[in-house]
Image (cartoon, rainbow, N blue to C red):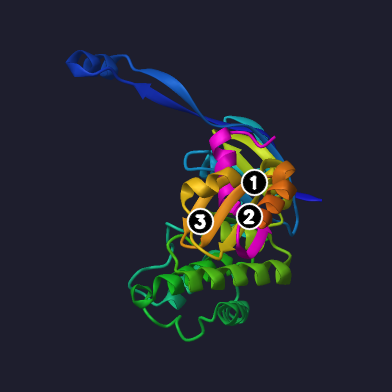
């Protein structure tokens, strides 16, 4: 059963037009004209309870605008959306108890106070009892490895620890639906892994629904079986990550280690040369020519090792964004 339903969702922003110079300024002041900028155009999808879905798109594609409509922060121009049985822009108290929005570049914790004090404020907002508060803080801080950090002022925490504390604050009311906008933004590799593992465990423990945007493809591949791809405000793909690779990556990556170094000119005949580093060479080869190319490489070059893999997911997604379609 769908916990998020989006049908023909759209958002159009009116933007004032101003001509340069004094005349343009006066005209703009007394008789303002506008043009319409579509940020999201006729987007439709459903997400079932307990799903973890990646929401991908380049900067300016409409990801954050869509998340803001799903959480009720802005009113859609067209279409309809329901989340956990509620219409988001009504901002009903029962709806707000069922969702949370985490934005990697925003913070809700009070900078000079211990994180625990901010958590107590959130508990009061959501009318959480003292016993439930202690239980949830204990459980979540254990999952996040934050037990000995909550009594320190937020400004003294590392970036990774602050992000974990932000997650704890956002989940203290145990929401059913998590909207995560770049939750690992700016974190080092170890902190990113820790946040991913926590989100995976939280999803499994509470059957929480997660809609995740991230520019770190490792977040998507680690957490999401399904992805939505948005480009120029339009949804261009809705399906499995594997399906996106199969549909949009009709090539394979062939990596070889040579017995001796060769020049770029000597290697170009075997496929699209993506990387040459000493004796290590990486080609992109169309699927239909893969067998022939491998046989040719083995017959004509002195090769120590050869591997065939799918192209990196980052390259595939980049191609989707560049073309603006996924079909």
Q: Which mark is residue 197?
A: none
Label 3 – label 2 distance at C-alpha: 32 Å
Q: Residue at x 44, y 62 (%)?
A: 108
Q: Which residue is mark 2?
A: 254
Q: Which residues are magenta?
A: 301-327
Q: Choose between 238 and 162: the one closer to the eye.
A: 238
What percent of the width, then of the height, locates residue 217? 57, 56
Q: Nearer the viewer, mark 3 or mark 1?
A: 1
310 falls in the magenta region: yes
Left or right relative to 150: residue 155: left
Q: Residues within 10 Å of mark 2 (few under 14, many from 20)?
A: many
Which residue is most to the bottom?
Answer: 148
First of labels 1, 2 by sequence position? 2
Look at the picture and state if 123 lies above or below 31: below
Give the crowd class for mark 1: few <14, some 14-19, many >=20 residues within 10 Å.
many
Residue 117: x %, y % from top left: 43, 75
| Mark 3: secondary structure | loop
Mark 3 / mark 2, whichever is N-terminal: 3
**Label 1 with label 2: CB-CB less than 8 Å:** yes
Find the distance from the CA under tag 1 to the CA under tag 2: 7 Å
For image coordinates 66% across by 61% down, the residue present is 307
Nearer to us of marks 3 and 2 is 2
Find residue 118 and report its horizontal and vertical position in percent: 44, 71
Image: 231 above or below 182: above
Residue assigned mark 1: 285
Residue of label 3: 182
Q: Residue furthest right?
A: 1
Q: Secondary structure at mark 1?
A: strand
Q: CA distance from mark 3 to mark 1?
A: 33 Å
């Amino acid at each position: 059963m769908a916990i998020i339903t989006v049908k023909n969702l759209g958002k159009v922003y009116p933007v004032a037009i101003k001509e340069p110079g004094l005349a343009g300024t006066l005209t703009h002041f007394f008789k303002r004209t506008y043009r319409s900028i579509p940020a999201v155009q006729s987007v439709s999808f459903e997400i079932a309870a307990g799903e973890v879905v990646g929401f991908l798109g380049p900067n300016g594609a409409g990801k954050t605008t869509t998340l803001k409509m799903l959480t009720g922060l802005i009113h859609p121009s067209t279409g309809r959306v329901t989340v956990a049985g509620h219409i988001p822009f009504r901002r009903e108290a029962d709806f707000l108890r069922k969702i949370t929005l985490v934005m990697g570049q925003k913070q809700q914790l009070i900078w000079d106070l211990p994180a625990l004090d901010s958590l107590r404020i959130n508990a009061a907002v959501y009318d959480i009892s003292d016993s439930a508060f202690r239980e949830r803080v204990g459980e979540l801080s254990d999952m996040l490895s934050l037990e000995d950090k909550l009594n320190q002022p937020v400004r003294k925490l590392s970036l990774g620890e602050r992000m974990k504390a932000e997650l704890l604050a956002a989940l203290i009311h145990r929401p059913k639906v998590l909207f995560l906008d770049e939750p690992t933004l700016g974190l080092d590799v170890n902190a990113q892994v820790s946040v991913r593992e926590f989100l995976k465990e939280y999803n499994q423990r509470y059957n929480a629904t997660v809609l995740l945007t991230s520019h770190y493809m490792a977040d998507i591949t680690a957490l999401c079986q399904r992805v939505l791809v948005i480009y120029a405000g339009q949804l261009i793909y809705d399906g499995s990550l594997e399906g996106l690779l199969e549909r949009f990556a009709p090539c394979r990556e062939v990596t070889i280690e040579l017995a001796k170094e060769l020049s770029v000119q000597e290697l170009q005949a075997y496929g699209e040369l993506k990387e040459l580093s000493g004796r290590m060479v990486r080609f992109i080869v169309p699927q239909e020519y893969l067998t022939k190319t491998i046989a040719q490489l083995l017959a004509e070059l002195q090769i120590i090792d050869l591997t065939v893999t799918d192209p990196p997911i980052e390259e595939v997604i980049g191609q989707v964004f560049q073309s603006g379609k996924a079909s």
